[in-house]
Amino acid sequence: MAPTQRGYDPQQVEEFFAHARAAYENGTTPSGDDAGDFGAADVRSAAFDLVRRGYRAASVDAALDRLEAAFVAAERTDFIAEQGQRAWMDAVVDRATSLYDRLKRPEGKRFAPPERGRGYDAAQVDALLNRLVAYFDDGTPITAAEVRTASFASAPRARAYAEGTVDAYLDRVVDVLLAVE
């Protein structure tokens, strides 16, 4: 992760990755404290300040994607060792089922609009959600990386979905997709 003009704060990135590595390798923080429940969700929600001479965001984001996949794989292995493959798949099906109700809603009505101002273009979000319907119904391929890197144009309130709700939903989609990849 080489410094660029403007990018993620190198100190924050280094501290996060040191913490994540220690948690992944032995369940402790770099200072030796218990890492607790640090896992894939913590990696997915990582955020860093933008600074001059920071790390290139795309490079850090790619490393975070790989790290998240490693945590999911480790969590899956631990879960299966304790409770079995069937229990793992049952849990994944439960999570996927909880997502499906929203997918059945009519286009343009799947999420609330922003309270004011602009939000994500509803038609673009719906296009991605239609791909998820095809995945769940027909097995049409879609990956967690495609969902994670999806971006949507800004639109006025009348043609938009609230960004926070869409982001939270897509985080849950990524969680399900990573569980089966």
Image: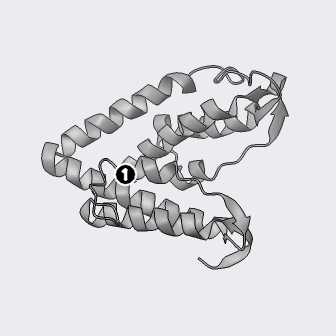
**Residue 43: percent from left, percent from top:** 46, 54
Determine which residue is flagged by label 1: 39
Q: Report the label total.
A: 1
Image position of 162 (left or right of 118): left
Give the residue displayed 70% in from the left and 60% down from the top: 50
- What kind of colouring is applied to the model shown? one colour
The amino acid pointed to by label 1 is Gly
Give whichever of 154, 10 is nearer the camera: 10
For the N terminus, the image quarter is bottom right
Residue 31 in sight: yes
Q: Quarter of the image holding residue 54?
A: bottom right
**Residue 77: percent from left, percent from top:** 24, 55
Image position of 119 (left or right of 130): right
Image position of 120 (left or right of 101): right
Residue 141 in sight: no
- Vertically, is 175 above or below 11? above
For the C terminus, the image quarter is bottom left
Give the residue displayed 20% in from the left and 46% down from the top: 85
Give whichever of 121, 37 is nearer the camera: 37
Give whichever of 9, 67 is nearer the camera: 9
Few, some or many residues within 10 Å of mark 1 (<14, 14–19, 20+):
many
Image position of 29 (left or right of 129): left
Give the residue displayed 51% in from the left and 61% down from the top: 64
SS under mark 1: loop
**Residue 31: percent from left, percent from top:** 33, 65
Give the residue displayed 65% in from the left and 66% down from the top: 58
- Vertically, is 172 above or below 1? above
**Residue 40: percent from left, percent from top:** 40, 51
